[in-house]
Amino acid sequence: NAGVMQNPRHLVRRRGQEARLRCSPMKGHSHVYWYRQLPEEGLKFMVYLQKENIIDESGMPKERFSAEFPKEGPSILRIQQVVRGDSAAYFCASSPPLAGVYEQYFGPGTRLTVT
Amino acid sequence: AQTVTQSQPEMSVQEAETVTLSCTYDTSESDYYLFWYKQPPSRQMILVIRQEAYKQQNATENRFSVNFQKAAKSFSLKISDSQLGDAAMYFCAYRTVSNFGNEKLTFGTGTRLTIIP
């Protein structure tokens, strides 16, 4: 059973461009979480999704950031008009439907660099 | 809102010795989960150990054990017989249940552990 997959692993964007980060959860997992890790900091929750639904986006910046988890395909975190402050590692984690009793399994992260 | 505090930005220990990493948290909930995650230079987040708040017995996983003091809201990690492969950032995390029913994690700022050969 493959783990959580994220791509790309590294992404370089110029200021003003768009960044798309992809996350494929583990097989059988229907809950996806996105976290952001700024340099020398811990991970901060951004958004929680189930298939076709955003459940909690309380940690997501109000502008330029969006997330989706379609019925088919990976979850996508989209950052429009990137700025230098968006440079960070973005981690995706997934858990099974009965999320209350299971750990979240993390992907390897996408390191976004904005130049 | 819940907060997690790791007051030791860096720690070092001699190989084969024991080291304890500290973590305190603040919450008004009576039931929750606490975790220690390891992040090596590869940046992959690896679960080390989990503690359920309603269990008084401290969790143990091989060389890793915790000292969970619920009243003091303290959750320290003890690593015995330290090995070079234990060198990493260690994050303490609290799992909350939001109004939406999800179990998002709240992380501390981490402790960088160095193993001295």
Image (spheres, rainbow, N blue to C red):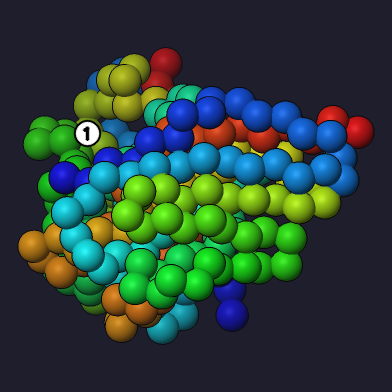
Quarter-of-image position of residue A23? bottom left
Q: Residue at x 41, y 74 (%)?
A: B55
Q: Which residue is mark 1?
A: A80
User: How many neighbours does mark 1 have within 10 angstroms: few (below 14), some (14-19), or many (20 or more)?
Assistant: some
Q: Is residue B33 above or below residue A40?
A: below
Residue B107, can we see it? no
Quarter of the image where the N terminus of chain B is located = top left
Locate residue A72 relative to residue B8 in the image: left or right.
left
Locate residue A26 relative to residue B16 in the image: left or right.
left
Q: Is residue A29 above or below residue B84?
A: below
Q: Position of residue B15 (x, y in %)?
A: 86, 40
Q: Residue at x 46, y 66 (%)?
A: B51
Q: Position of residue A93 (x, y in %)?
A: 41, 60
Disc 1 marks a residue whose amino acid type is Gln
Q: Position of residue A4 (x, y in %)?
A: 50, 65
Q: Residue furthest front?
A: B71
Residue B87, can we see it? yes
Q: Chain of mark 1?
A: A
Quarter-of-image position of residue A19? top left
Q: Position of residue B58 (x, y in %)?
A: 53, 67
Q: Residue at x 26, y 68 (%)?
A: B31
Locate residue B19 relative to residue B48 in the image: left or right.
right
Quarter of the image where the C terminus of chain B is located = top right
Q: Residue at x 15, y 69 (%)?
A: B101
Q: Is residue A25 above or below residue B41?
A: below
Q: Is residue A44 above or below residue B81?
A: above
Quarter-of-image position of residue B49? bottom right
Depth order, front residue of A87/B84: B84
Label tally? 1
Instruction: Classify mark 1: helix, strand or loop.
Output: loop
Depth order, front residue of B26/B92: B26
Depth order, front residue of B80/B71: B71
